[in-house]
Every structure is written in C-alpha cells, then in structure tokens.
Image (cartoon, rainbow, N blue to C red):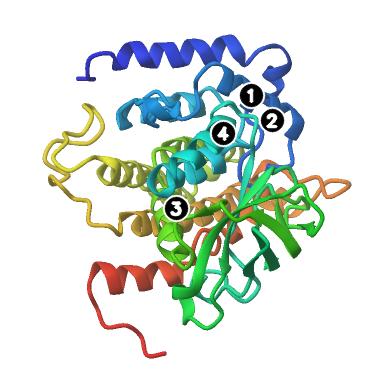
Amino acid sequence: MPAPGEDAFRAEVRGWLDANLTGDFAQLRGSGGPGREHEFVPERMAWERRLGADGWIGLGWPEPDGGRGLSWRHQVIFSEEYARAGAPGRVGHIGEQLLGPTLLMFGTAQQRARFLPGVLHGTQLWCQGYSEPGAGSDLAAVSTRARLDGGEWHVDGQKVWTSLAEVADWCFVLARTDPAAERHRGLSYLLVPMRQPGIEVRPIMQLTGTSEFDEVFFDDARAAAADIVGAPGDGWRVAMGTLAVERGVSTFGQQLGFQREFEAVLASARSTGAVDVPALRARIVQAWIGLQVMRYTALATLRPPGHAMPANTVPANTVPANTVSGVEANVSKLIWSRWHQRLGELAIDVAGPAATLIGPGYDLSDAQRLFLFTRADTIYGGSDEIQRNVLAERGLRLPREPR
C-alpha cells in the first residue's frame, strides 16, 4: 500500500500537470530530452520558470535550503507523473540534479544561499564542464587549468560534450589548479559564469542533424576566488560526489520515456506486421523484460537501507534488504545504455525498408532519430568500458589493470 499522503500527492502532481500543460505550453508535450534538446528551447526555459514558481523544483532538498524536504518515494511519484504527462525535457535538470545536491553536500552556507535560489526558481541554468578531448571517461586526466591571481581564478582550456552550454548561465568546471600534483590530487571544482569574455561555445553537430552538445573554450575566463566548492585540490572528491547523485530519482522519468519509445516501436511492429515475425517478436518481448529489469534495479538502488519497496512494484521476496553497495549506478548505466541501443536497432528493423529512407532536409522519423542518437548511449555518462572497470575494481575488489 502507498504510504500516507502518497495517493494525494500523486493526484496533486497529475492535476497540476493537466492544468499547466495547456495554452502555449501544450505544444511542449513530448519535446526536448536526449536527441531533441534543440526543440522549443525558449518555451522550455519559460516552463522551467513555471515549475520553479509553483514549487516543483528541489522536491527532496532540505526545507532550510528552499526545498520541500519530500521523501524519495514522493520524488519518484513526481518523476513518473511528469513522464506520463509527456511534459517536456528539463533544461534545468543539470542545476537541480547535479549542481544543487553537490552544493548541499560540499558547498558553504554562502554558496548555497547564493546559487540554490536561482535553480529552485528556474531562472539560473547550469552546464557541466568535465569531459575534454583527451579526458573523456578518465576525468583524472583533465588538462584545463586554473590559477588564482588577484582574487580571481583564471581558467584556460577546453571542455567537450557540454550539454546545453549555449543557454547555460554557469558551468561547474573541473580544472587542474596544482600542475605539480599527480592526476586527481591537483584538481579543483570551480563555479564559472558563462556570459563573459574569454568563453567561446561551439555547437557539435550530431548524427541526428541537430546539436545539443557543445565544445567550450576557456581563454583566461574568470571565476571569483570564493567560487570554488571544497578546498583547492579537493575537486576530485567533489566531482565524484556529483557523479554519485547523477542517476537519482529522475531515472524513473527516463525509464518512462523509454517505455513510451517501446510502445511506439510495438505500435510500428503491429502496423507493419513485424510483430508476427518470430525473431522480431522475441526481441520485442526481450525489450519489455528489459524495461522491468531497469525499474526493479532502480528501485533497489534508491531504496534506503532497511526500507520496504513500494507496494505493487516488485514481487515479494525478489529484492533482498539493504542491497545498496556503491556501484549500483554503474550497473544501471550498463543496463539502460545497452537496452536503449537495442531498442533503436529494433525500431529500424520493425519499420522495414522505409526506415532506410530520409525525408527532404534530413527530416528523420522518430525511429531513425532513436537509432542514430542511441549510438552514443554506451559512451556518454561514462563509457561501458569504464563502468566495467569500476564494477570490477570497486564492487568485486579485483586487481587493477596494469597501467
């Protein structure tokens, strides 16, 4: 049974979405998100402000810091209802899901008071400055450097695959502040304003013909001396804290997006008759099973030790108590990235020969966009190879590979 108040909260979320995804916002249903970040950007920024004005950002943040202090179960409910309503992909998710929790863990009281309200109100957008051309999944190899001079950090270097950098107001940047230190020991976590001389953003064209990732070049860009999270040289620990919260309750919204894509593939298979082809039918069944595996894995990962699972979510006695060990996020990434790629391949196969044709002006169908964009799923957010190394070394305690 749902905990007291959960049914009422679900009804509240559903009612608010029904009442607000109307008028100018009605066109946003189903827009945005991975592969579609180019859609309705100004309108989705306005939607972010509407969410903030009505208190739907930072649901799980502590009340003294402006949040609502709601439980993880309430946050799951919101993510599920948000996805079911077809609400648009969030342009503020990096601020809410990554920067905000990082400041709550490692930031000073002054930093929380300064930066969290903009995220909560949907008026301040963030991007993440981690990956570099020579340091993708290996963050300890970053070469972007920063030096403290005259009360400011001077930042030089390049970041790549920076989502939504063209609209972001701020970027949290992992930079090398002690060039003499080895690898992760000389890194710092800086908060850098994007709208200043010395920062250039160049869009990266994708296979889908659109651009949602960017290159960001820093040429003596500036950040205030106080805009560092943690101590100088403590950036690795802070950065790992950010990565630890990257796959939180919003994963349920992601999975419901996957479910909508699966249902579209199933409808296509019924339309083309592919559902009656035994080999394709078996792949459709496997895709459905994969959806259930992802959901159960996410529930087990998010559940605090000793907490019961929500009713009607998993069969009794299938998830042992206190399963969280620290590498569940890596397991989840491996599961969904491979599953999503296979769904993209299945979408093309069930569509038949028509899937090989592209409309005028590189006008892609949903199946084609899904197939092309999911080529990147096993790379971004930490490549599969890195995920397996983490599982082997930190989860199974196997010896490190020789370097």
Viewer-nearest residue: 224 or 279: 224
Residue 68 placement: quadrant:
top left
Specify few, some or many for label 2: CA neighbours under 10 Å numbering under 14, 14-19, or 20 or more.
Answer: some
Contact, CB < 8 Å: mark 1 with mark 2?
A: yes
Task: Name the disc covering residue 49, or none.
Answer: 1
**Up-down relation of residue 242 to residue 298 (above or below):** below
Q: Amino acid at mark 3?
A: Thr
Considering only order in the chain, which callout, 4 or 3, is on the residue closer to the N terminus? Answer: 4
Left or right placement of residue 135 versus residue 307 in this view: right
Q: CA distance from mark 4 to mark 1?
A: 9 Å
Q: What percent of the width, then of the height, locates residue 365?
A: 72, 43
Q: CA distance from mark 3 to mark 1?
A: 24 Å
Name the residue tied to disc 3. Answer: 242
Report which residue position mark 2 lands on. 45
Reading the image, the residue beneath label 4 is: 119
- The structure residue drawn at horizontal position 76% and vertical position 31%, both measured from the top left corner, is 42
